[in-house]
Amino acid sequence: MAYRVLMELVARPDSIHEWIWDEQNEERGVAANGNADFKHQTGGKAWTGKLTSDGTVWEYDAESDADTKMAELDAADSTNRRYKVVEVWWLS
């Protein structure tokens, strides 16, 4: 198996709080009028392996190597872009 470092296609704008942008922040509840159940989910949902056509796709055999590269990319990024490591499955 391989592990790939992905980055958000669109970095979170400074004007938007992280908790609003966070795609994992999902709420369920009753709407203000008390008549309907609602689901509210916001945030970036587009992830990519590279931002430009000549960019590098970071893929590793070991998850720990991918985690190390993800931390390196995150530390070097001055934007609010998030990074994550995903397991890549190949079907034959």
Image: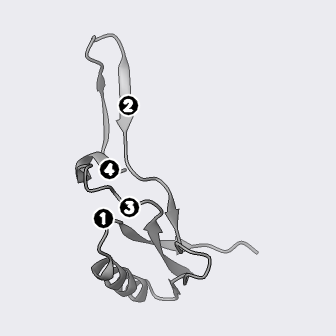
Work out whether 43 lies above or below 84.
Answer: above
Q: Which dot, 2 or 4, sits closer to the camera? A: 4
Q: Which residue is mark 3?
A: 11
Q: Which residue is mark 2?
A: 39
Residue 85 drawn at (x, y percent): 43, 73
Pointer 1 or 4: first along the chain: 4
Q: Residue at the location (67% across, 74% down)?
A: 90
Q: Which residue is mark 1?
A: 80
Quadrant (top left/top right/bottom left/bottom right) for the N terminus: bottom right
Residues packed near mark 3 inside 10 Å, few (<14), some (14 to 19) or many (20 plus):
few
Pointer 2 or 1: first along the chain: 2
Q: Residue at the location (37% across, 80% down)?
A: 70
| Marks 3 and 1 close (CB-CB < 8 Å) | yes
Q: Which residue is mark 4?
A: 21
SS under mark 4? helix
Task: Look at label 2 and name its amino acid.
Answer: Lys
Give the CA distance from mark 2 to mark 1: 25 Å
Give the CA distance from mark 2 to mark 3: 24 Å
SS under mark 2? strand
Residue 47 drawn at (x, y percent): 49, 62
Task: Look at label 1 and name its amino acid.
Answer: Asn
- Residue 76 occupies quadrant: bottom left
Q: Residue at the location (32% across, 52% down)?
A: 22
Give the CA distance from mark 1 to mark 4: 10 Å
Task: Look at label 4 and name its amino acid.
Answer: Trp
Give the CA distance from mark 4 to mark 3: 10 Å
Residue located farthest toward the right when viewing the structure as drawn: 92
Give the CA distance from mark 3 to mark 1: 5 Å
| Marks 1 and 4 close (CB-CB < 8 Å) | yes
